[in-house]
Amino acid sequence: MADKTAITPTRSEDFPEWYQQVIKAADMAENSETRGCMVIKPWGYGIWELIQKDLDARFKATGHENAYFPLLIPLAYLEKEAEHAEGFATECAVVTHHRLEAQKDPETGKTKMIPSGKLAEPYVIRPTSETIIGAAFARWVESYRDLPLLINQWANVMRWEMRPRLFLRTAEFLWQEGHTAHETATEAVAETTTIHQLYSDFLRDVLAIPVVMGEKTEAERFPGAEMTLTVEAMVQDKKAIQAGTSHYMGQNFSSAQDISFVDRENKKQFAHTTSWGVSTRLIGTLIMAHSDDDGLVLPPQVAPKQIVIIPVTPKEESRQAIIDACHALAQTLTSQTFHGQNLRVHVDDREIGGGQKKWEWVKKGVPLRIEIGPRDLESHKVCLQRRDQGIRDKSFLDREEFLREVQSHLDAVHQSLLQRARTLREEGTSECTDLASFESHWSSSDFPGWLLTPWDGSREQEEELSKKHKIAIRCIPISEEVAPEAPCILTGNPTTRRALWGRSY
């Protein structure tokens, strides 16, 4: 008989429903009364705060500054950049009135709030802020001496999502959006690639998620961009998630919005701009990449609590001594650091059953659980359980030994999750060199992983294949090594270009 799991259904039984149940069991978020929007609860928001803190430090270390721009964007601003606006048009929420009037229903006696005061010009709730930030840049930039402008915004955005799913796709979500303006194309492209690498490093070193770095094809490019770079992650059902993007916009936005400057030869030039961002979608990626059939599994750097200490108190006479020992251990641990931050430690001394406590923290994904009972107290030991290991796996360590090695235990959890995710991606990615095998692959399973193929097809041919098999080119992988020349799977033309195909969230 299979062991009972904390989450039902399991990943193999129903992956999408398993995902929802992990969020519920970990008490991370819930659907709100506002259609398509979510309430992020303290445990889920704590993860976002840690993601935000780390990324914010990385942005500032590369010379960027934070600013804030309006939530409402004049419709005329979007009309200036038609190609960009068309990319978001079907997802825009529009504000058309500026007040409410109370009207009492004569039959029911109930008061209804009726919109009135129609706006002369509607406002769009920002789906992204290129247009309104571009208007500010146009005011701020006069000379080449004003460049580069390196701005980041932490904000919420709204895209009217028809099929919402917590963290992955919600009508309102949280993100950061970087927007920069540069004197030359070379500088702007360098900015784009710098952020691309920053995202890859962050996902690997903080979230324990390995990614494929690549460039989007013309069909998949951000509306209005000349180049879109992406980091693509594989999750456990072998679908792809676009975990972050960095765009070189060329002079498309600056010419539409008059972000111009007087150059070194006293001539007017349009700035070269970039934009880039990641969102709370990273939390969905994290859940799908690492969690198991007992709940959430968190890499240590984004765990709101990295260590939970559980007193085991079967006898009243030793209860207080055990609780005191747990708090003393916690106090010693919190004076230590992990990746530059004090350890986040919690003692769960609630008067409820030890089994209930254990499973709550298992489902919340806490990296290390420590139990101290009467025998541990006498022998100066602790019982250590790691969330990346089997639910029954445990080791007994001398208290002082654990204190000396706690950072290495947390590092081991991170490395274990990273290697597991790398193995999944390697086993889930196959090379394919002919069209028959390509089409057979996508028809054989709902989630058959990724295919890497030689590709020299046109945009129209790419879109036709994508529509037929409900797939997309996730990216053209960027590699230091040039791939050997091979025939394109569709056209037969020799090419060194490789395309990574997959289904995605």
Image (cartoon, rainbow, N blue to C red):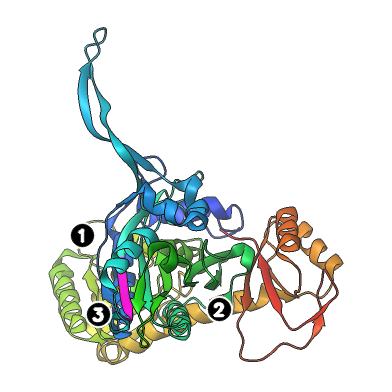
Secondary structure of residue under mark 1:
loop
Q: Nearer the viewer, mark 2 or mark 1?
A: 2
What residue sits right under mark 2 in the picture? 213
The structure residue drawn at horizontal position 36% and vertical position 55%, both measured from the top left corner, is 157
Residue 282 x/y as whole percent: 43, 66
Q: Nearer the viewer, mark 3 or mark 1?
A: 3
The structure residue drawn at horizontal position 26% and vertical position 28%, both measured from the top left corner, is 116
First along the sequence among labels 2 and 1? 2
Residue 349 x/y as whole percent: 20, 64
Depth check: give the residue in front, 37 or 225: 225
Depth check: give the residue in front, 182 or 235: 182
The structure residue drawn at horizontal position 20% and vertical position 59%, both measured from the top left corner, is 350
Q: Is residue 376 above or below residue 34?
A: below
The structure residue drawn at horizontal position 22% and vertical position 80%, both measured from the top left corner, is 377
Helix, strand or loop for the magenta stretch, by majority: strand
- Residue range in magenta is 147-153
Neighbours of disc 3 within 10 Å: few (<14), some (14-19), many (20+):
many
In the displayed structure image, the side of residue 60 where residue 85 appears, left or right = right
